[in-house]
Amino acid sequence: MMRTTMYRWLGAGVLTASAAVSAWAADHAGDVAVSAREGQLKLGGQRVEIHASTGFNIYRADLGDLFHGPWATSNPGFQTQGSERLKPGVEIGFEGLGALSFWDGARWSLAPSGTQLKVSDYLEVDSIWSSAGFTPGSSQLLGETRASGKLHEHLVFSVTEGAALGAYQITLRLNSTDYLSSDPFYMVLNRGLDEASFQRAREAFMQTSPVPEPTSAVVLALGLVALWLASWRRQTGRRAAPPIRGLVVH
């Protein structure tokens, strides 16, 4: 009798573990779908929205869950879905871009001073977004693909305790030494808004014109100067460039 009871207990444990593994491996509608095409990481998913001017993906999550508390969440996850596979044993990382934005119910702007949004990676190292920009951690590792080529990992997103009610937005992209980096993508995280208000925040963000990265802005400015100089030389026949007052490039 004792042996039979023990076998039943072990069998129940195996079934429970199998169910947990199956649930973990299943495709999650809210997760970021990760794949690769022509050597580049690609992102998709069933709950993705598209930014109007950039065409980049927008993903969403609610800060505050039972496991991580009122200021954090580990959603969405990042996973290969369906029949998609990556190379086995590949490390996938992430890169932060831009600054932390905030929706106050009326408009998107830089987050209030002193407010940070942290992303804790696979090694529990924090990278930080604020109104001043992005501060990378010593590691920015999402995870490693299994021998099967499948990936299913979660970062932990957390906002400063006591942060204002509203929505927060950060920009990231995935990278790997085995693949070209993905296109940038946006994360919009809800801090205490009801669903209708959060939807209005996302809809407003879809129509914003993100400020270009400082490097990109400099490259754009230099390109415009080069075009102006070429036009000036054609019109005057001169080879030397005129002085450009007020232009300082660091």
Image (cartoon, rainbow, N blue to C red):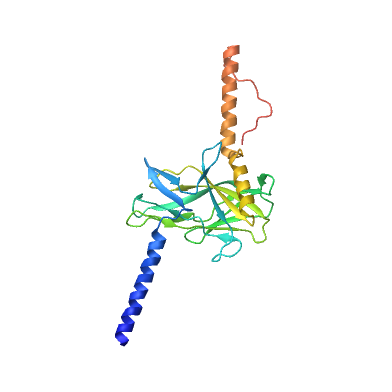
Quarter of the image with the C terminus in it = top right
Residue 43: x and y, percent? 45, 46
Give the residue at the far bottom of this rendering. Answer: 1
Question: Residue 159 in the image: x percent, y percent?
Answer: 61, 57
> Which residue is nearer to you in this view: 237 or 136?
136
Numbered marks: total:
0
Q: Position of residue 86 (x, y in %)?
A: 36, 50
Residue pictured at 42% horizontal, 45% vertical: 41
Which residue is at the front of the view, 135 or 241? 135
Residue 218 sits in which quadrant? top right
Q: Quadrant of residue 116?
A: bottom right
Q: Name the quarter where the N terminus is drawn.
A: bottom left
**Which of the pair 193/242 is nearer the observer?**
193
Q: Is residue 176 visible?
A: no
Q: Position of residue 72 (x, y in %)?
A: 58, 60
Can residue 153 be seen from the camera position used here?
yes
Residue at 64% across, 59% down:
160
Is 55 placed above or below 245 here? below
Residue 147 relative to residue 175: left or right: left
**Residue at 51 percent of width and 41 percent of height:** 56
